[in-house]
Image (tube, rainbow, N blue to C red):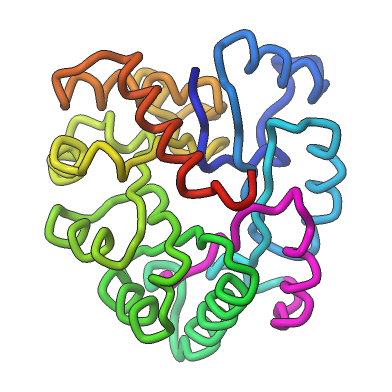
Amino acid sequence: MFIDSHCHLDRIDLAPYHDDFAEFVKDAESQKIRHMLCIAIDLESYPAMRKLVAPYEHISLSVGVHPNATEGREPSVDELLALAADDKVIAIGETGLDYFHGKGDLDWQRQRFKNHIQVAKTLNKPLIIHTREAGHDSLDVLKQEGADSVGGIIHCFTEDWAYAEKALDLNFYISFSGIVTFKNALAIKEVAQKVPADRFLIETDSPYLAPTPFRGKPNYPTYVRYVAEHIAELRNTTLEEVARLSSDNFHRLFAGSL
């Protein structure tokens, strides 16, 4: 049984499922997907996303505004607190820093990040962290703002082992996406080998970043098994063990909300 710890279910291509979300969910269940964490990226699309997953107890939500979201309204702490008080919401984010897409003065991005951390601490819910070309600044903000008190996930991990150790020290879990299956992702593969058994998760980030052998195509939560299979190879263990460990880790991290 697998848990996809990071997916964007309101953005997946439902054409193979006759544009029927219920049909997709049924297929995911048949492929041993036990739970999915559907991640928010802005406030404008959140109500529809909340309505989409409402009937399904095994689909949880996060609330937050992605660091690359610039078209919608800026989230206030009070608005995030109100939305995240929902029992369906188990995490805050995704949030963080992105210097790859972000240009110019990014003080607004850092303030948005700090606001999300404040919400997470107030509600005692873990954070979902996005960081791209801003790794050390992201860790600095997490440390300065006391985010270790709630912890969370460094999602779609793309850094090296030295960075992973610092994230682990801050009470964060490491989540591997389809990128770990890419041939040239050597540093990420090393982290997958070394990360403690009780501190890693698996994800798809669907509809993005499909794993080998689907690279470049639309991604689905059902492909999380390919991530797990590759990690099992790297760690010289079984698929079943990786599925069990990552599921246990997910439930430990979110024990206060599930």
- Residue 152 lies, in percent from the top left, at 45, 58
Is 105 covered by the magenta stretch?
A: no
Relative image position of residue 164 (x, y in whole percent): 21, 56
Closer to us: 179 or 129: 129
Point 66% across, 55% down: residue: 40
Query: Would you place residue 145 above or below residue 201 in this image?
Result: below
Quadrant of the rendering where the C terminus is positioned: top right
Q: Which x, y percent locates residue 159?
A: 23, 55
Q: Residue at x 53, y 70 (%)?
A: 67
What are the residue bounds of the magenta stretch? 72-98
At 74% from the left and 72% from the top, the residue drawn is 72
**In front here: 161 or 131?**
161
- In the rendering, at what x and y percent does residue 146 appear? 41, 80
213 shown above or below 4: above
Q: Residue furthest front?
A: 256
Q: Judge whether 117 appears above or below 9 on screen.
A: below
- Residue 194 occupies quadrant: top left
Residue 91 highlighted magenta (yes or no): yes
Relative height, residue 84 to residue 38 (above, below): below
In the picture provided, is 96 more to the left or to the right than 56? left
85 or 104, nearer to the observer: 85
